[in-house]
Image (cartoon, grey):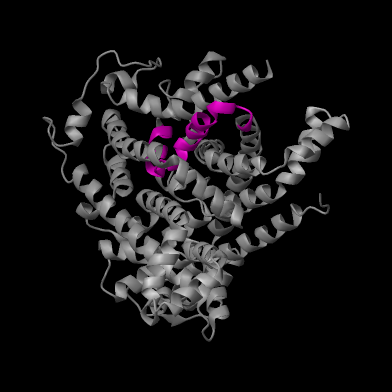
Amino acid sequence: MRKTVTLTVLALASLLMTAPFAWMLLSSFKSNAEIQRAELTVLPEHWTLEHYRTILGVGETQLAGYNFTRFYGNSLKVALAVTLLSTMANAFIGYVFAKFRFAGRRIIFSVLLATMMVPFPVTMIPTFLIMGRLHLLDTHLALILPGVIGAYGVFLIRQFVNAIPDDLFAAAGIDGCSELRIFTTIVVPSCKPVMFATALFTFLTTWNDMLWPLILLQSQEKYTLPLALMAFGNQYTQNNGLILAASTITVVPVIILFLFVQRQLIEGITVTGMKN
Amino acid sequence: MGPLMVFMGMFSLLPILYALYISLHGWGFAEGPEFVGIGNYQRALSGTDPLFYKSLWNTLKFVLLTIPATNALAIVVAKLITKSGRWEPLFRTAFFLPVVTNIVAVCLLWEFFYRGDGSGLFNGILALVGVPNQLWLRDANLAMPSIALMQVWNGLGFSVILYTAGLKNIPRTYYDAAKVDGAEAMGRFFYVTVPLLMPTITFCIVTGTIGAFQVFGQVLIMTSGGPLNATRTIVYHLYTAAFDYFNMGYACAMAFILLAVIGLFTVILFRLTRTEWEY
């Protein structure tokens, strides 16, 4: 009885959480006139692919400057680059902070942790100006670089490497392993789960980021998906069907990806949350 | 290692020091930096720019409207989810979907729900109970609560995940002992669950508050800070100062004031959620 109540309440709440997505998906197949109507319909009266055809550039209506396949490519490129580079760099730096003794190690690590607490609004303007000095404004490289060093990732890896017994490193040293070899054969395998989880999280936040691309990018053909969607929404305010279809194509692939990796992602979030 | 350290400094420490430097200067795009001391900070704090305190207050409103509601709801949902047995993964997924969605799509979608005419979902619901159409995002009184409601929906899943994990860490024996002592469900919740969940509660509230103080995308997309600056938040205000009016110095000063406010709230929240007892 108690269980039935619990399940019913959760089922209803889950419906509330997911209904907006269902509405978005279904309405993207409706005609503009139907979306605009006062009464709320669930299923489209007449299913139409018109909005998707327009967005993907195969319909009768042409959209100037909005090539969503290209935006997909941009987003994928930036998110993958940040994810790969940051995962490797953070693991390596975390390992160095955990196992190497060097002058100023404590201080440098504390400073790194302190920078982690500083919110992005403080650093976005100077980072923007630094990118200007480097002549990197309006480039994907400038989008990628600041995301590479995540103090948080360094911190996590350091915790995990600290947990690896020192004997293992000593033994590897006696066997004549190089630092790089130790890193790839001992550190990476034992940190794999946490590296994978932070990588997923990095990918997701980079993919969804809007603020940094908004500040940095000028040329529309370089836009990432959220930025393109925002510009698109501003330009086609009256065309509801197009906006819904464009939103859907930015959301659905992420949801599908999430369904495949949700266990690792959620475990990763839990680990990072509990470690504090 | 050397180059990595330099690179690390360049994108972590250098921007912060540089921001401090910029904040002490009059700094436009065309003209070079001109030292003004604490002038930019004075301009904000003295009320010369009336929109500064207004946006700070709006931001605080957003924090107060989202954080308590999100955490209270998330604890209840997490408690239910831990009791849902084999359905747990399904429910977790449902609550987490909004979290993985990009904020632009979320805002565009909710703008449909908040439409001021009869075609908006919320006006449709109000019509059922005989309340006239509201303007929602175009109503100065309703705009901020509307954005906050969307944010609760959007951010709930993240806290739910953390609370679910936190609840699972509480050993069953405490509940059994409380039952033997005759504690009812409510009593067990407030005297066993809440105190033992305190570390998670602190973490969720502190990180949530830090994030909420930086609310930006939602107001940029949905209201552009309006109507009548009712949703102008501090990050939106400093963004416009920097990139619409090219006043980098003033924008950086406001960013540091925001940092101080966030720091103050973090300290207060840590104090408030500190438990005096141990189990």
Q: Residue A146: tell me if it is visible.
A: yes
Residue B83 within the magenta-colored segment of the rendering: yes
Q: Quadrant of the N terminus of chain B?
A: bottom left
- Where does residue B132 sit, x and y in percent of width and height? 53, 20
Find residue B193 and report its image quarter. Answer: top right
- Where does residue B245 sit, x and y in percent of width and height? 39, 63
- Where does residue B47 sit, x and y in percent of width and height? 59, 63
Which is the main secondary structure of the residues drawn in magenta? helix
Q: Which residues are magenta?
A: B82-111
Of residues B25 and A77, the one nearer the viewer is A77
Find residue B71 and report its image quarter. Answer: top right
Of residues B99 and B226, the one nearer the viewer is B99
Query: In the picture provided, is B261 more to the left or to the right than A52?
Result: right
**Residue that protrudes farthest toward the right in the picture:** B181
In this rendering, the answer to whether A58 lies above or below B127 is below
**Residue that protrudes farthest toward the front in the picture:** A175
Residue A176 within the magenta-colored segment of the rendering: no
Query: In the picture provided, is A88 more to the left or to the right than B87?
Result: left
Query: In the picture provided, is B217 more to the left or to the right than A215?
Result: right
Q: Residue B144: tell me if it is visible.
A: no
In this rendering, the answer to whether A8 lies above or below A87 is above
Query: In the picture provided, is B251 more to the left or to the right than B258?
Result: left
Of residues B47 and B102, the one nearer the viewer is B102
Tell me what residue is drawn at x 74 percent, y 45 percent.
B196
Tell me what residue is drawn at x 36 percent, y 57 percent.
A83
In this rendering, the answer to whether B200 lies above or below A114 is above
